[in-house]
Amino acid sequence: MDKKEARERIEKLKKEINYHRYLYHVLDAPDISDAVFDSLKNELEELEYKFPDLVTPDSPTQRVGGEPLKEFEKIRHLTPMLSFNDAFSEQEMLEWEKRYLDFLSNKLSPLTKRYYCELKIDGLAIELIYRNDLFGVGATRGDGKIGEDVTQNLKTVKAIPLRILGQELTVKNLRTAKLNEIADKLERDFPKEIIVRGEVFLNKKDFKKLNAEQEKQGLKAYANPRNLAAGAIRQLDPKVTSSRNLDFFAYALVTDLGQTTHEQEHLILKALGFKTNPHNQPAENLTGVFEFHKKTQALREKLPYEIDGIVVILNSEEDFRKAGIIGKAPRSAIAYKFSPREATTKLLNIQVQVGRTGALTPVAIMEPVGIGGITVSRATLHNFDEIQRLGVKINDTVVVSRAGDVIPQITKVITELRSGKEKEFHMPKLCPMCNSPVAKDKDGVIYRCTNKNCFARTRESLDHFVSKAAFDIPGVGPKIIDRLLEENLIHDASDLFELKEGDLAALERFGEKSAQNIIKSIQARKKIELRRFIYGLGVLHVGEETAILLAQKISNYRPVISNISGFIKAMQGIDLNELQKIPDIGPKVSESIYNWFHNEKNVEFLKRLGKTGIELIMEAIKEGKQKLKGLTFILTGGLNALSREDAKEKIRELGGKFSSSVSKEIDYVVTGTEPGSKYEKAKKMGLKIISEEEFIKMIE
Ligand SMILES: [Zn+2]
């Protein structure tokens, strides 16, 4: 991006970010998620970093906070309602631990469970004040010091008790929970005022229902349950709040009832009659915290409410106090968030892929982007109708979402960020794979290739590409190729090298580990022997032996080629005559080779492979012991001492040739266990037949 383009992009980003900030902070009605907002802000920050003189004082990166609402009465919190700093990785958690330990000079209370872990619910933090057991005042966090009085609205939330359980029952409950010291204290003296804090939230089901109603009325949908909950609590009419079906979990006890750990706070809250989250639990150390984080992330999709991470708090109340506050957050607590499930990126291209039934599926090829902890680069667009529904064009900035194990989806186009260089997408009239005519289903939305063999051919050529004698990619066989084709993740071999972990992780049967392994093994094969590369292309009549001959022929070219553009040049430089001069290549084969390398589509395919950064390895022709020079072998049946591949390699290494069909040219027929029809044929033709042992003696 040059400076002029950067300036234009920055202007557009600033406008868009400011608009969404206004929707969020002033109107309480954002129409994009926090993750998408952050994604846009990150892009702006990066551009401003690259072009520092384009930073202006009005840039959203230059300001903090937002405008307050003015409709409710203000309430001053006796102790400030703090917010939490965020961590997104184990590394950041370790750094956080080190920071507060340094501050406390490594002196901590002797507790076996150092931390308390809670689910971080995507809701609205509130404070509740009970006087003489009765709910008196409820307030929002506001700026932490001054909140808004929303008592009437909170009274409509059924999970918030209007009266706590009172002295007798609370004491009884505390004894059941084995908190006898606290029970004794409260039996002597039950406080007149109790202050608790917690989270008001909306269940996913209600969120969906309310948003559907909202859309029915032609109103804008809420971006997340938190905003809807916040909107509901800040309604001037409590009847509206009541209709929203809000829920509540208590998570902090502000009043001192003799608690010494945060875990006890939760137990006391429960004893008082508050709803506490049953998933919360203490952890011995950070290892335990990491386990809890993992377990909770796996639970996330199944929970009835939305969470965006966990909150980790130093369990000892004394240590917590000593660690104090830094900025607006306690030093000894942190929000350990999950990776965001949405991000913005650039749509680079729309590729059309042909499925098993001939259906043409448009697939979005995107600038690789991290979502949910992994990188993705492609997303299916399903069909042409979906493209029209989204209104997406090539070069657009799009929002990509990935929830749980669901395949990444493009959910939105940010049209405000268009530059004018966007291109409309059209369904092709001819199949991009085989050039046959494309037809649209009658009364359907699917376009299909009319050639019945289209998919089978694509699959066959891909299977050939990854086969043992070609690229031989560990872990990527016909089964995986089938899955990748079915999920529209690849349309030809070049796509294999562009796949990102996140593209595979969503697939059934791939855990994230194996997706990672597959990507690794594909990337490792980017350095490939020239003969394997040529064989993998699947040129008609070019078997392994011919591929070797061609590789040898090219190896004589100077300068030595190592990239594909050099390879294309070299192959196109050999004319038919020269091809036929190569021993063992007849007119039929040379014609096939010549035509393949002069076909536009094939050259395009080679160029795509070249762009992925494939490196060709030229193998020096071994001069040493050419014991088998001039001899041709064929193998039939299973070998014991070495694999077929090793046997073939050995023959070639020693200057011999390997054949796959029986002919008079064959000098030795090596027979292993259970030799097949080749053996019978060879016997009839009177060829020389040897055992595996004899063969091994020859190559030793
Ligand atoms: Zn086709």
Image: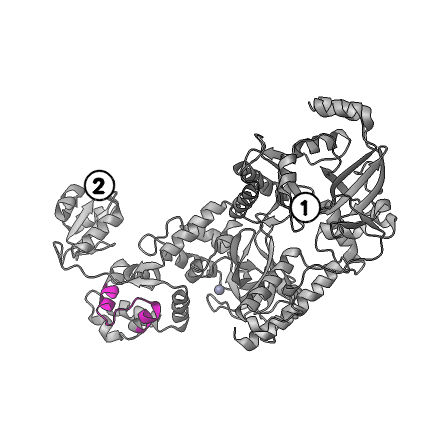
Residue type at mark 1 is Glu
Q: Position of residue 362 (x, y in %)?
A: 55, 63
Judge the density around disc 1: few (<14), some (14-19), many (≥20) Cα neighbours within 10 Å: many
Cβ at disc 2 under 8 Å from ligand 1: no
- Which residue is at 38% across, 64% downward? 613
Q: Earlier in the sequence, mark 2 or mark 1?
A: 1
Left or right, residue 14 beside residue 351? right
Q: Is residue 351 above or below residue 71?
A: below
Q: Position of residue 610 (x, y in %)?
A: 38, 66
| Residue 249 sits in quarter | top right
Q: Are marks 2 and 1 in contact (CB under 8 Å)?
A: no
For label 2, the residue is: 641
Q: Which mark is residue 638?
A: none
Q: Is residue 236 above or below residue 386?
A: above
Magenta: predominant secondary structure element? helix
Q: Residues under labels 2 and 1: Cα distance?
A: 59 Å
Residue type at mark 2 is Ala
Judge the density around disc 2: few (<14), some (14-19), many (≥20) Cα neighbours within 10 Å: few
Residue 584 in view in this figure = yes
Foreground: 234 or 62?
62
Q: Is residue 386 above or below residue 237?
A: below
State which region is magenta: 549-569
Q: Which mark is residue 306?
A: 1
Left or right, residue 698 beside residue 525? left
| Residue 470 sits in quarter | bottom left
Foreground: 4 or 85?
85
Say whether residue 145 is magenta: no
Element at badge 1? Answer: loop
Say whether residue 561 is magenta: yes
